[in-house]
Image: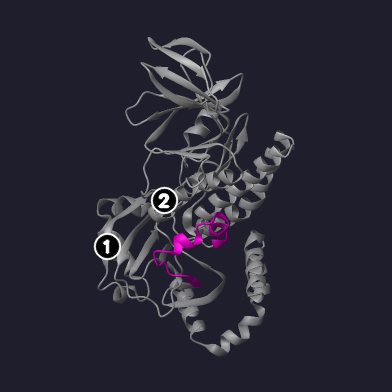
Amino acid sequence: MNSTNFQSNSIVYSRYACPKKGSEFYSLDGIIVIVDIESMERTEDSMVQHKYDIVIVGARAAGASLAILLGNQGKKVLLFDKTTFPSDTLSTHHLSHTQYLKALGVLESVEGNGLRRLERMRTYIGDSFIEGPKSEYSLAPRRNHLDSILVKKACEYENVTLYENTKLKSLIVEGGRVKGVQIQKEQDDSQDVLADLVVGADGVRSKVAKLVEAETYKEQDPIRPVFYGYYEGIEPLAEPATEIFLNEGRIGFLFPMEPNMDCLGLEIRPEEFEEFSKNPKKAFEKVYQKHYGMKRRMQNAELKGKVVGTPGIPNFLRQPYGNGWALIGDAAYSKDPSTGLGVNDAFAQSFLLAEALKNIDKGEDWLQEMEAFHTKRDENMLPAYRLTLEYIQRLKPYSSEHLALFNALCANPIALSKLAPHLPNMLKDVSHNIPELYGSIEMEAEALSKK
């Protein structure tokens, strides 16, 4: 073997040509180690520097799902997160688009702990409710369960590497282009990692977005505080359903999870946040038991853990790509959680970006593909964004007269039979300023007709 010597940090290494293609021997005090040089690059400041096709910052729903898709494409991926898995995060739980889980190859695993399939939606207004079937079932997995399954699936690909307890220190930028990241794992020294593309999937307060100064548009300040908790022993409905309570200008959510376990949530009025923060459990349960039937159904319920909350979620879209970087998930697009689409939106963005990168590998122009990714992202997300903001901004307490009329209507089958044929035109009239509402009903009706 031919050898050369070089020095790094006052230690002399001997480097040998290796019979294995793409590898080299390094010898220190007679100990020989085989190093995969295809994933490393020499620099003046260090002996070796890791090199990946893609570095993904953030390993929850958005980042882990992208790692699965890119791993399947054969890309060399580094996926890292500041936390370890399994672990929880402040998040919505409602997965209404299970086709993403199926496409990622994790649907069976997610359902494996006994999650109930939610095939119906029930909406309460005061003491009355309307219930109907959904075109496809929903699931309500806890994030420590969902995220750990996604991470585990990503790690099944030999070309995907996971670093936990690892923080992003800074981006490596050369000539105006992001070339990699500087990371730190626990108490270790910082490490430079080079990549063809750095993807920020690091949440609403994305450090990647901040460092690249990604443009933010269509911004709206947080609108409503949100609190939720996990309860055991809630009396269930005969058939599991997603339950929504519209009461006194608040929104209540009940998401059935595993048998005998439910996630209860509340979006409250902004002026109530301070009082809720003093004793979240007491304030939460006092309000929740005002919902129709819930005082009885919560008689034997027990809170598992704590009621947690936030003063609100910022609403925005960000420019999702630039020179050597991209953004997905809440780092790229965030909105009020009242419509329960956050995780679904994260998956959708991962699929769109993976498609763009696949086309680039086939020889398509990088800029054109990333512009198309941006356009498709906005075409997919903006209707729900507008619908969510319109819904939450206009939600006010119903007057006693309106509630009385609604209750009387729900209790009168003759009136309902007369009203039903006119509902489509009525909905068009009341949604003229937000056509996405009628469009979403039409799409769901078409899907139900094919079921």
The reply, left or right, for residue 406 in relation to residue 288 is right
For numbered disc 1, what is the local secondary structure? Answer: strand
Q: Is residue 393 visible?
A: yes
Q: Is residue 85 magenta?
A: no
Residue furthest out toward the front: 1
Neighbours of disc 2 within 10 Å: few (<14), some (14-19), many (20+):
many
Nearer the camera: disc 1 or disc 2:
2
Question: Which residue occupies the foreground of this view, 222 or 116?
Answer: 116
Q: Quadrant of residue 174?
A: top right
**Distance of mark 1 from mark 2, alpha carbons?**
23 Å
Residue type at numbered disc 1: Leu
Residue furthest out toward the bottom: 414
* Sooner in the amino-acid sequence: mark 1 or mark 2: 2
Q: Which label sits on residue 148?
A: 2
Color encoding of the figure: one colour
Question: Which residue occupies the foreground of this view, 121 or 256?
Answer: 256
Residue range (magenta): 98-120
On the image, numbered disc 1 is attached to which residue? Answer: 303
- Place of residue 440 in the rendered image (x, y in percent of width and height, measured from the top left): 63, 64
Q: Quick check: 46 above or below 194? A: above
- Place of residue 10 in the rendered image (x, y in percent of width and height, measured from the top left): 37, 9
Neighbours of disc 1 within 10 Å: few (<14), some (14-19), many (20+):
some
- Place of residue 4 in the rendered image (x, y in percent of width and height, measured from the top left): 50, 11
Q: Quick check: 299 above or below 307? A: below
Which residue is at 29% across, 51% downward?
277
